[in-house]
Amino acid sequence: MKTYKKQKIQVYTVLTILTLVVMFPIYYAFVMATLNSTESYSYPPRFIPSSHLFENMKQAWKNAGMGRLMFNSAFTATVVAVAKICFSIFAAFAFTYFGDFRGKYLFFGLILITHMLPLPVRLLPTYDMMKTFGWVNTYYALTIPFFASATGTLLFRQLFLTVPSSLADAARIDGAGPMRFLWHILVPLSKTNMGALFLIEFNYIWNEYLWPLVITTTKEMRVVQIGIKILLASEAQAADWNIIMAGTIMAMLPPLAMLLIFQKTFMEGFSMKEEK
Amino acid sequence: MHSKFPNRVMPYILLIPSITVIVIFFLIPTIRSIYQSFFRVSPFGDRRIFVGFGNFSRLFNSPSYVDSLIRTLIFAGSVVVIGLIFCVIVAALLNQRLRGMTIYRTFFIWTYAISPAIAGTVWALMFNPATGPVVYLVKLLTGKAINWMNDGNLALAIVIIAAVWKMMGYNIIFYLAGLQAVPNELLEAAAIDGANGIKRFVKVTLPLLSPMTFFLLIMNMLYAFFEVFGLIDIMTKGGPGNATEILVYKLYRDGFIAIDIGFASAQSVVLFIFVTILTVLQFRYTQQKVFYG
């Protein structure tokens, strides 16, 4: 029993030290966001928060036009997440409830292939295409190319395969069409997965950097990740780290808050995906 | 097969949205990328000249490309090895049935929600040559003033640290999910046989986690190749010199700044081949456990 207790203390000690190391950068970023400009340049660096957080946030908000950026990020991330959920539920439903229709495996392959084509691989031609469409600096360009989801399709397909087939039989006998079955039976069963997928995709789009960088050039269409670049660049000679960090904290808050609040849904979604 | 709805048109209607997006934004651009990699735009930008594999031989004869390739491999290899070793240990510790573990878990997984760009900003602050806390600490301990703005190796190391830190949340989430699946009886049996904690971890847990490790290895590779663009752009812009110019960054520079379309397209194709290999490996060895975060 004694060794057990000793081990317990060891585990806590190691974890506590690692936690401090891993959390320190973010703690320091927060401290920086609360300092005024003299304090931010003090040497040795200051590790205790000061009282200028809101001032700095206001300044960052003004310098980078943060309001618009936050709106753009939130809007595009929400639209993409919702569209991905709908598109992948439709696709998964098609793959699981309609037998072997012609072209099924080709289509399935096409959806899986999106995994093999990360954005950098098709960056230039996609950009050219956006120019032809006249989509540069539009919400269309920021959202529509992301609508397909292999992850989502596989996730919902996996789930639908575990739904007892008697349910579909019963529905059919009662004269319910496929869409009614989807809406009234499968969608309610998919809530946890939908929640997890929403978090994953919202997070993914909110944090996307390369695509918004090349496809948007105006202040009105920039997203929050680019806002950080704007804050960094606007202070070319001597960076105002306190302002930059205030902006950075605003930029990371929404997805972080979502993750922490819905941690349970999120973890369930992940472990579900792992089952098979 | 599952019970079916006898409807011949419906599945196609249901698939139209996804397939349309995939054809327009994935398939056609990829094919055009491959096509363009065989051409060169004339100096006046008015004609395309077919050059066969010319762009590719230019690529592999270009010291800056080969250099970037090697840097990318060093970068990706370090991110994968350091990240996975660190995260599997932390996850194993977090998986102990002890009080307060949920709170500890939160401390380690939250970087999942941080973007590479933000991770880059935070670490640029940590190593800020003037007043960064790490620089200060090193100065205090060794008397040396480190400056990654003019030290390529240091810059690469810092970019690796930032990239590992950002990916930590993702890796730990997946390792924790994998650890849930390790049967307790096995560990208990090992304990009865006298194996201590570390021995149990090495002999029982690690082997059982190997499919998860393989999955994460691939995901981390893809991450290190493709998703760290924001981190590099914010922190170093590929510098100092070309010390942190990994392949994606070079592609962006050649395609969007230098506008050398054929050359950049050839780079896309090389990256595409690379992803294809990784994906095939993943499908072969992980029974379709393909899940992106």
Image: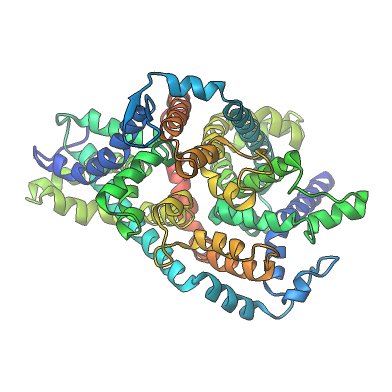
Near-viewer residue (B288 or A25): A25
Quarter the N terminus of chain B occupies: top left
Identity of the residue furthest to the left in this view: A175
Q: How many marks?
A: 0
Q: Position of residue A27 (x, y in %)?
A: 70, 64
Near-viewer residue (B194 or B222): B222
Please identify the quarter of the rendering in which residue A55 is found: bottom right
Identify the residue shown where x is 64% and y is 60%.
B103
Query: Along the horizontal axis of the image, is B280 left or right of B65?
Result: left
Q: Position of residue A178 (x, y in %)?
A: 14, 48
Near-viewer residue (B149 or B137): B149
Query: Along the horizontal axis of the image, is B143 left or right of A175?
Result: right
Identify the residue shown where x is 68% and y is 80%.
A52
Q: Position of residue B106 (x, y in %)?
A: 61, 57
Identify the residue shown where x is 39% and y is 63%.
A221
- Taking A235 as reference, is A164 above or below it? above
The colour mode here is rainbow
Q: Position of residue A261 (x, y in %)?
A: 51, 65
Tell me, yes or no, if residue A211 can be seen here. Answer: yes
Identity of the residue furthest to the front in this view: B44
Near-viewer residue (A245 or B48): B48
